[in-house]
Image (cartoon, helix red, strand yellow):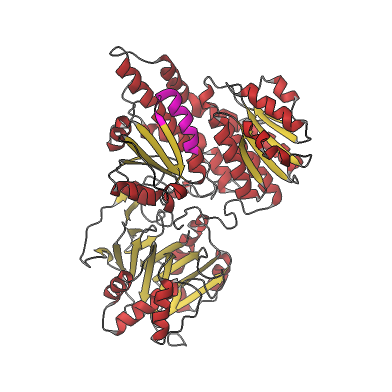
Amino acid sequence: MCGIVGYIGKRPAVEVLLKGLSRLEYRGYDSTGIALRLETENSEGSKIEIRKSEGKLENVQKLATSLPAQAKNSLCGIGHTRWATHGKPTTQNAHPHRTGHVVLVHNGIIENYQEIKEELLARGHKPASETDSELFGFLVLDEMAKGLGLREAVIVSFRGIIGVCSVVVMSERELGKIIGVRNGTPMVAALDPSGGAILASDAQPILEYTNDVFFMGDGDLVELSEGGAEFFDLTTGLPKKVESTHLDWSIDRIDRGGYPHYMLKEIYEQPTALVDTLNALLDRAKIESFPLAKHRGTELLMAAEELVFVACGSSWHAALLGKYWLEKYARISVSVELASEFRYRDPVLRPGALVIGVSQSGETADTLAVIRAMKKQGVPTLAVVNVRGSPIAREAEGVFFTAAGPEIGVASTKALLTQFLTLLTFAGALSAKRHHEHGKKGSTDPLTDALFKNTLVLPHALTAYLEATDGVAKQAQTIAKSLVDAKGFFFIGRGYSYPVALEGALKLKEIAYVHAEGYAAGELKHGPIAMIDSDMVVVVLAPKDAWRDKTVSNLEEVKARGARIVSIGAPSDSHLRSLSDFWIPLPELEDDALLPFAMTPAVQLLSYEIAVLKGTDIDKPRNLAKSVTVE
């Protein structure tokens, strides 16, 4: 959601803020702004200069060119990208907000804002915006009027609000300080090697300066000054120690690297992400199949008698696919739940159940809420996330980190495939455990051994598939030109292909704004087939697996009703190809279970090419945010 950057040190703050905010554009936003400390008052008597605007960051970048010299030379400031919740996406509602000598930026929602607003109006305050965020500034203003310092005023004010949010505050009365508080929505701080400190909504804006960061926890307060960063407990107000984390991400991995969009770059990074994730998951010193590295997460997984996945969006699709693998190989009971539904039900969990939250960002509000609720009930929890130090990673009892690296495109690609791989690895590891428990000592399962062998070579096969000169990328581009004006799309598949069909439809909706639906192919005749006519496109996922013949029967049904057919299947499947208007062959893989790793890039590229032709903002789709940190 909203992005925050704060800086104080020896560098020009306007450059740090604007560059940092550009690193946070992927989070989704509709207005932006910066506030800069001045060494002397401006013509209005203010010591903090603000520039903000609705729309994209480039609007504020243009406004920054007209800043007075003392603002351009400022060494301290805060910046923000806003994704509208309370109030329209206007310049008036954009952050930073000024309330007297207090200036702030805010991420999240203040749930009791109406009560606070009524109280402030009764005191004579007159908010200038429609936001809940501005109200916090008045609370701080009133506390400082009572004689409290900035940090103490922020602490007292924050204790009076309800909601998941983070806030960063400056004051013209204490210009050498920036105060940041984290409660639910993420905040990361770091020391600038050149002097001073920086904070942000995530690590992306910080990596240019240092790889050693402090992931703040809920109830943490940080005070930035030219001397560095000090941490405090919001409840007690006392200093506290926060351990730093070293990130192995590099700034060059965040840049587009010559690709026109981050999404395309990240599609091509998928084989590397799979290799990195395998290396992170496995103890490669061992020779058995799927030897998970030993840690608390592995212990929880191996002890589980039932797995309950909770996730949202693409991560939910990954969990659905994982259910197929886990049931087939590990023979363990698996349920897959939408976190936004599960958290408000009264679910019945049997003894031995393990709840697993799957999230790319590790920030997803609904998934985080489930993990916290399960902890309170004493249910073991596990996380599969891509971001170290993220809230879900910190809250879960055990965690497996995927190694996709930074994913900037809002529509998940490489992070999704690393989730696939992680859940496949779970299936293999539990299968090996089950076979060992029921077989002779030292025996192995040929099926699991073959899956492991083929998984190890999967990244190489995927690289060849993506990089072939006249391969899937070229085919997707050609097909997109013929289908760009289609009324709508159905993606259908069975078995392993069904979650991929859901993902393909989601990608097309996300980045091309085209009506698309994903279905289990057998469900078409139960209603959706009424939508089929010559203006509809049906993307049929029909690799040569146990479900292929049934899926082709469903293809015949929609073809008879005039739909245009895009088939994705085995290169040797001449029958399937003859039934199709357009055709994308898959690579020959030794194991059917691995076919989703090839089908997914195919639907990603098809959606991408259609979006390119439609001219949409592919990396930052309208109305979407990379990290959904509020309900």
Tell me which secondary structure the magenta stretch mostly adopts. helix
94 and 9: which is toward the camera: 94
Question: x, y (%) of residue 394?
Answer: 32, 49
Is 268 colored magenta in this rendering? no
Asked if residue 519 lies left or right of residue 2, the reply is right
337 versus 306 height, above or below: below
Residue occupying image coordinates x 55% and y 38%: 268
166 versus 142 height, above or below: above
Question: x, y (%) of residue 477?
Answer: 69, 39
324 and 620: which is toward the camera: 324
Question: x, y (%) of residue 117?
Answer: 42, 78
Any part of residue 429 in sight: yes
Residue occupying image coordinates x 40% and y 81%: 120
Question: x, y (%) of residue 204?
Answer: 43, 54
541 versus 128 height, above or below: above
Residue occupying image coordinates x 78% and y 30%: 560
* Chain part drawn in magenta: 318-333
Q: Quadrant of residue 440?
A: top left
Asked if residue 130 lies left or right of residue 240, the reply is right
86 and 408: which is toward the camera: 86
Residue occupying image coordinates x 33% and y 82%: 142
Asked if residue 507 lies left or right of residue 438, the reply is right
Q: Quadrant of residue 496?
A: top right
Any part of residue 73 in sight: no
